[in-house]
Image: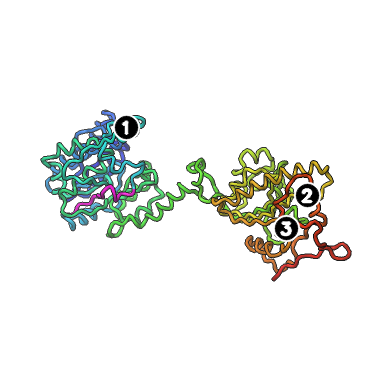
Amino acid sequence: MSVGIVMLVHTALDRAEEVARHWTRGGCPVVIHVDKMVPRKTYDAFVARLSDTPMVLFSKRHRCEWGTWGLVAASQDASELLLEKFEEVRHVYLSSGSCLPLRPVEELVDYLEQRPRTDFIESATTADVPWTVGGLDQERFTMHFPFSWRKNRYLFDKLVEFQRAVGYKRRIPRGLIPHMGSQWWCLTRQTLTAILQDPEREKFDRYFRHVWIPDESYFQTLARLYSTNIESRSLTLSKFDFQGKPHIFYDDHLQLLRRSDCFVARKIWPEAARLYDAFLTDPNGAMSQQEPNPGKIDRIFAKAVDRRTRGRPGLFMQSRFPNLGWENGVTAGRYSVFQGFAELFQDFESWLARATGAQVHGHLYGPDCAEFSGGQTVINGALSNNARLRDANPRAFLTNLLWNTRGERQCFQYGPHDNPKINWHMSRDPNAQISVISGAWAVPLFKSNANFAEIRAEAAALQKIESKMLDELRSPDVKARVRIWTMAEFIEAPMEPLQVIIDEIGQKSLRRLSEAPRLEDLAGFGQFLQNLKNQGMHPYLMGDFPVDPAPRNLPGGHRKPYLIKK
């Protein structure tokens, strides 16, 4: 025998028994440490079941709470017992009750016999460790941590704050350079014996007893003092998520685990019967004798972490919904917003639908209702046109609409009459294409027969609202594709900007179209604006309109169309 196994067990004792028997069938002695929190009756039954296997021993029990000294003490006692009782052991492999051998035991034995002086232990200085979650990298070695992070989080945090405030720092024992790494190692007898029999072990133990998560630093630091050849990696496949919690492997991870070529994996779900059957009872399922390479599956785990933390574009999820800026794309697809076009052009929505093939809505955020295309009252995803339901969460309304209609370009009208709360949300959405003809809201007022005093008051209110909207659209934080024209600028040459907008939508070729939408009759509009000025209101968003603009009408009352260049 050349490899001995130390197993730290605290749950799923039936699975731990299976794995222990698997190791002994391969000729490896096993020392098991059972957490002291496991009831005595359960422990005694477990020991009795394995009493028929002389190569399985049990070490002194310790209380093993996460991140505490008990895990190190358990590893020390179990390792000492293993080295004492099995003199032929040349490597000691530390594992847990949730670990599962992935390759035949003989392959692990051969692999380690070819490397008789190599210690496999992940060991890096705190400056080089990227995986610490929640801070406390160097501080874990210079502060006291008498309280449990899990059970007494309040006291833990308060004591950390106090030690920072007063500038308290513990002295690191002379000659030690703190290192960190995975708890799961495989050390040579020489290195492990040197650590356990060090004359200064009592001092080292006393120091590490109050280090935070000492099981990830005790052996990792001391191995640097005695090892002649460290491979800074673990032979155990152990993956962690962005919160520092271990990934759990289930039955559907079978092929994934085979591809890793690793000797052992953790954590295995106790009910993953398919995994235990495949790796513990099927010698024909052994993998080829390859160098362990967990990097083969890192891409898959990276995708899993990305999906969990970012989600699918435009689909809000619990992990990121309350956090501004955490979304993976504000919305699920590109969409176009038109402000002022329906007021300036006749039958603009129908023309846009014909020109692009997109789904064109009216004012989705209109004061009375959401004006869905075709006058629908309910659209994909059972979205109602009810204004009160929509305005309860305008942002969710837009995200749901675009998610439920993904694959089809959505276009809708917007303006100062509409709910203003959605404007900033759209402006920071890279999927939004926002086109604004400022001041076009004045055209319906110009064509109305209302009392001029009422027109003046409404014009002043709408101009104030649109001015604020334009300020938001011009913010340096805007990520949408925004184009803004004054009304005077746009009607001078409307064909070119229309062509650019339609080409960007890109839903349908424009070769069959020969004209742009027809402008509203604006004869007298300049005088209308002058009248507003005469009444004390300054309409500046429309641009510079002459009082008597040159007529654009052809004889017979027909307006000349704007031809689209090909």
Mark 2 and mark 3 lie on one chain; the one further toward the N terminus is: 2
Range shown magenta: 118-130
Please name the colour scheme applied to the rendered image.
Answer: rainbow
Instruction: Tell me which residue sits at (67%, 57%) in the image.
Output: 485
Is disc 3 surrounded by few (<14), some (14 to 19) or many (20+) residues within 10 Å?
A: some
Q: Disc 1 marks which residue? A: 162
Q: Nearer the viewer, residue 260 or 424?
A: 424
What residue sits 22% from the left and 52% below the top? 120
- Secondary structure under tag 2 reads helix
Determine which residue is flagged by label 2: 444
Q: Earlier in the sequence, mark 1 or mark 3?
A: 1
Amino acid type, mark 1: Phe
Q: Nearer the viewer, mark 1 or mark 3?
A: 3
Res. 284 visible in picture: no
Distance from Cα at disc 2 to Cα at disc 1? 66 Å
CA gap between label 2 and label 3 equals: 16 Å
Q: Residues within 10 Å of mark 1 (few under 14, many from 20)?
A: few
Q: Position of residue 414 (x, y in %)?
A: 68, 49
Q: Which residue is mark 3?
A: 488
